[in-house]
Image: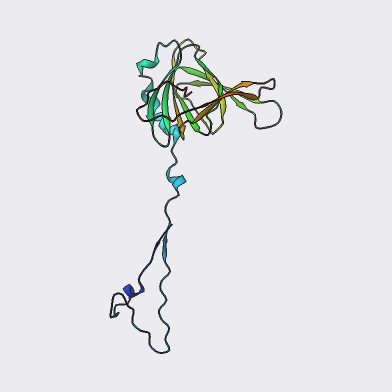
Amino acid sequence: MAFAYLDPAAVLSDAPSPRRPPRPLTGSRAPRPPEPTVLHAPSPRARRQVDLLAIAEGFAVSAGGITGLRGLEARAWILLAATDLFEAWAIGWPPGGRIDLHDHGLSRGAVVVAEGVLTEVSVEADHPGPAVMTTRRLRAGDHRQFGPHYVHDVNNYGQADAISVHVYGPRLTSMTYYEPDRDGRPDPVRTEEIEPVGPFDTTGAHDPS
């Protein structure tokens, strides 16, 4: 919060000095200085929000042309962008490509299918009793958005390659992998701590799916 103070002498044209207001007449009341003007800076939180889905959709327009993500024997990924607010990846899914049940820690995410078809299974277990599992078939142009600790898996059950764009904000710092228990609730198996990537990092050291 910043304050701007206005000099009362600045509004009195007959002041003998720019620094000293005139002496008030006998029995009169000295002029009251105006209230300070309060300048409200924009909230840092509001200023630094990013639209993850819009970023993912923008990259998905050309992600299908990344030849390095076709004809694969196993999933592969390429870093598209990294800032202090988000990271974006393109992922190639050969037929049969999959990732186990997992979350993305404290990061929010947006996924857009650029080419092919993927199947997502999400698990909701924030209530007593068996978990609720939802299966979604995602075709080219379809998307998913999710918040922190969202648990899902992704598979390519088709016979053709698929390519998707994944954007996370803030950047990934951890991913926890799960196995469903007898009620289908996600049981943590391991957590991977992730070193945030830099803008020129093309490492495959961690799986951004």
Position above or below: 88 against 20? above
Residue 56 lies, in percent from the top left, at: 42, 29
Residue lying at the far bottom of the rendered structure? 26
Residue 93 appears in view: yes
Task: Give the number of marks.
Answer: 0
206 sits to left or right of 68 = right
Q: Residue at x 42, y 37 (%)?
A: 85
Residue 66 lies, in percent from the top left, at: 36, 19
Position above or below: 123 against 5? above
Q: Quadrant of the N terminus?
A: bottom left
147 sits to left or right of 26 = right
Residue 136 appears in view: no
Residue 148 lies, in percent from the top left, at: 54, 33
Position above or below: 47 against 122? below
Q: Residue at x 42, y 25 (%)?
A: 89
Q: Residue at x 36, y 68 (%)?
A: 6
Describe the colour scheme in one phrase: rainbow
Residue lying at the far right of the rendered structure? 129
Residue 41 lies, in percent from the top left, at: 42, 53
Quarter holding residue 84? top left
